[in-house]
Amino acid sequence: MSADQSPKIVIVDESPIRAAILQEGLREAGFTGVVHISEMQSLLSRIYALDPDVILIDLENPSRDVLEQMFQVSRAVRRPIAMFVDQSDAASIQASVDAGVSAYIVDGLKKERIKPILDLCISRFNAFAKLQDELARTKSALEERKVIDRAKGILMKMKGLTEDEAYVLLRSTAMREKKRIGEIAQSIITASEMLK
Amino acid sequence: MSVPLHIGFIPLVDAAALIVAVDKGFAAAEGLDVTLAREVSWSNVRDKLNIGLFDAAHLLAPVAIASSLGVAHVKVPILAPFNLGLNGNAITVSPALHAAIMGELDGERFDPMATARALARVVALRRKSGDEPLTFAMTFPFSTHNYQLRFWMAAGGVDPDEDLRLVVLPPPYMVDSLANGHVDGFCVGAPWNSVAVDRGVGHILHFVSDILVRAAEKVLAVRQNWVGKNPDTLAGLVRATQRGAEFIEQVDNRDEVVSLLAQPERVGVDADLIRRTLEGRLKVSPDGTLRESRNYLLVGRERATRPDPAQAAWLYAQMVRWGQADFSAQALKTAMSVFRPDLYDGALKTAAQPGASATIGAFDGPAFNPDDVAGYLRAFKVFRRMS
């Protein structure tokens, strides 16, 4: 690889969404040679065929151990080094482990060229984790809405209330009992099923 | 006040002593508040231990040695004050390869020399008819599985680097790869060999105890500089893990141990598979053939928990034999000092027994002598020099 060329980067990730987010970020930053591998079958031969300068892999991927085999090869393949080999930048190693990503870099690639790639990786991995968190929260909020709607329906039917009155009853009970509305709603559903 | 500890492990049956020590409250009784972190790769366990995210780890014995020598990776001195298991691995092959080996077998079915020679004939026949070379999988370059597979096949005259392909595969992928024909055999720990037999896609050809009578497998690993700062914590951890190991070997506790280990956040596989592993009573063929061995996996019996530096020397000799490390007297000394029976004895107040190294008992080659590793290695015809 000549100094002015964009390094060839391989992303090994079974999550297509996270890989896409990372790929997009790298392209925006001017790294054009990015390939995503999502299939773990014959991973090593695919990597040898692509001959990348940098390999990025998520830490939740058991195939990290497969990559370790690259250190053993004595044939005329370029030997990569793991990011963790160079401990001069402890903060960035810590940040990458926290974000859940690891990098293998072919020997000879300059450190200052790696840093922006790694920093970008870390921030995109963190962004993805946040996104997943939000998704999970939205999903549980949606489910709680359904529970509250069912509880309101039960109250309306059994006590002849309007929807607004049913909601007010739920809310005031929750405040009195120091519980969440969703919890009161769930106990109404459970009780009504028991009394059926 | 209790000491918080983060300890990494891979979901395998030989993490049992550590898991039981924590889940039965033995660690808490020593004033340790242990959080066990289930990991997906040995690389993760090694790196998180090295950079200090873990205080201790369930680790492949050769990884502890490689890390201390700085072979292939950053040099971080690691100590093993406790041995979590001896043996426990097995070699499993596809039904087709099993039939081919049995067809060429001249000797007993479980005699490793007979099967290794049969494998050599299968390899030669395949070459003659222009078939693809066989592929065997193991779990990590610096693994007992790698060395045990190599030791076995080389005894029959098969060169593991020239005559077939040897690849790394994460244990959870082994059985599928055997089923879909990507590999013809593998060497792995429990429970994966039994999973392959149960699915009807493999035969257990050998328990590793056929190849070596006693082989150090996983250790409780800590950083050397951590030990210097936390001697009392380490002693407590060793005592708790020893209680765990002893608890496991009590037959009356088996039901409880099996259900603890089967939990999804621990080993997380079928309880019956774990039971068979601990009892050393394995189904070796899909037709239901059973094979029993007291030596299949040793956790708390026969002084298995006391680290033996001769075992570390044997593992280092394998690194040299297969071109992963150069031989030097200094490196040998470093490798041996990874295994620390003195820390074990200090924690448990057991009497040190100098010279009490139990035999490694390999089926091929001369008796192993840590004082003459170079001479030992000269006895083997198949080897690979560091390039």
Image (cartoon, coloured by chain):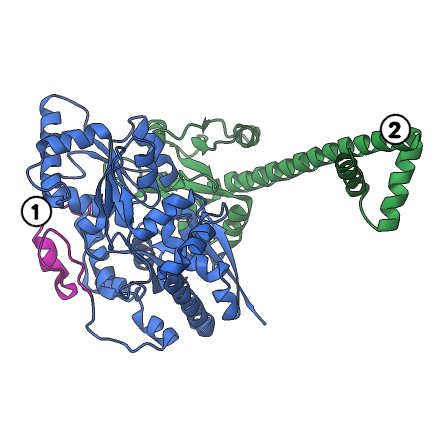
Q: Output the letter for the chain in blue.
A: B
Give the residue displayed 69% in from the left and 38% down from the top: A137
The local secondary structure at tag 2 comes to helix
Q: Which residue is mark 2?
A: A157
Q: Which residues are magenta?
A: B358-387
Residue B378 forms part of the magenta stretch: yes
Q: Is residue B366 left or right of residue A145?
A: left
- Given contact means CB atoms under 8 Å apart, are the residues at marks 2 and 1 in contact? no
- Image x and y of residue B370, in percent: 16, 64
Given the image, what chain letter belongs to the residue carrying mark 2? Answer: A
Q: Output the letter for the chain in green.
A: A
Query: Are tags 2 and 1 found on a single chain?
Result: no
Residue B254 forms part of the magenta stretch: no
Give the residue displayed 32% in from the left and 76% down from the top: B350
Q: Amino acid at mark 2?
A: Lys
User: Which of the two marks, 2 or 1, is nearer to us in this view?
Assistant: 2
Any part of residue A166 in sight: yes
In the picture, residue A144 is in which quadrant? top right
The single residue placed furthest to the front in the displayed view is: A196
> Marks 2 and 1, Cα distance to the nearest angstrom?
87 Å
Q: Is residue A29 left or right of residue B341?
A: right
Q: Is residue B329 left or right of residue B334?
A: left
Give the residue displayed 22% in from the left and 57% down from the top: B214
- The local crowd at label 2, few if under 14, some if 14 to 19, many if 20 or more residues have their Cα within 10 Å, is few
- Image x and y of residue B381, in percent: 8, 46
